[in-house]
Image (spheres, helix red, strand yellow):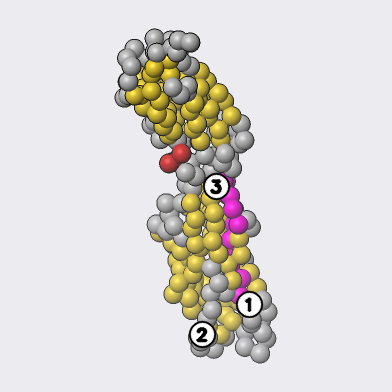
Amino acid sequence: LNLISSSASVKTGETFTVDIKLDNITDKRPAKGIDGVLTYNPDILNCTNFTFLLDASEGLENITFEDGKVIFSIMDGNISSPTIIGKATFKALDIGKSEIGLTDVKVSDANGYKFNKIEVNPTTITVEGPNINVKVNVNGPAIYRTNNPITVSITNDGHQNINESFDVRVYVNSEDIGNTTISSLNVGETKTFEFNWTPTELRDYTIVVIADTSNSIKEEDEDDNKDVKNTKAVEIPVF
């Protein structure tokens, strides 16, 4: 039994199908009944539909949906050649990888005898999404009692456009000195902002910029939503 996906990778919110194909079957010993459990990661995928592609008499097929699995069985027909027995439709819920496999598989012939050594070849789906990457730049050293603009660049280096708003906040030694909102960010797009900052002490400073502080955007990598730069405020050199 081979699981064949219509796509190896999808984006969040997209749908795809997986065919369940029975191979290595001949008219010397045709198959009549198949049952098993289709499994997947319910945190990443949702199976929205399962359809048999074989003709069966009423009451001789069964499909039950549970969390992370579809339990199926069909008895009827005469499978004497490689055949796609069913098709499952999935929706991508979250970013990550999910194997789609089969367990508890039983294939029986026209006489009700089970086939031995059923081999199952699963498939793996990668769900892609956007990714917010944050970079911050500031003078080093910074000039005491002078405006030292903090430049912030926000890039979507993922695989999906961002079409909902998210915030960007700038902190200097834990003090919130400014924020902005980005309403959308396409794949490969960078938006740059400047925040005014005037150091009032001759000391070391840590500048932290964080994007999407509420984690409203599902991303491929949440760890690069933050960038940190250290600088020191000095007096204007006198020559």
Tally of numbered tags: 3
Query: Would you call the spot at circle 2 few (<14 residues within 10 Å), some (14-19), or many (20 or more)?
Result: few
Q: CA distance from mark 2 to mark 3?
A: 35 Å
163 relative to 104, above or below: above
Expressed as whole percent of the image width and height from the top left, the position of residue 225 reads 45, 35
At x 55% / y 64%, what residue is drawn? Answer: 123
Magenta region includes residue 19:
yes
Q: Which mark is residue 128?
A: 3
Amino acid on which disc 3 is placed: Glu
Expressed as whole percent of the image width and height from the top left, the position of residue 119 reads 54, 79
Query: Would you call the spot at circle 1 few (<14 residues within 10 Å), some (14-19), or many (20 or more)?
Result: some
The residue that disc 1 covers is 23
The residue that disc 2 covers is 117
Q: SS of the residue at dot 1?
A: loop
At x 62% / y 88%, what residue is drawn? Answer: 29
Earlier residue among tags 1 and 2? 1
Query: Would you call the spot at circle 3 few (<14 residues within 10 Å), some (14-19), or many (20 or more)?
Result: many
Q: Residue furthest front?
A: 239
Label 1 close to label 2 by CB (< 8 Å): no
At x 34% / y 24%, what residue is drawn? Answer: 204
Q: Is residue 145 visible?
A: yes
Q: Which region shows up in magenta? A: 8-22
The secondary structure that most of the magenta stretch takes on is strand
At x 50% / y 18%, what residue is drawn? Answer: 194
- Quadrant location of residue 214? top left
**Closer-to-camera residue (205/123):** 205
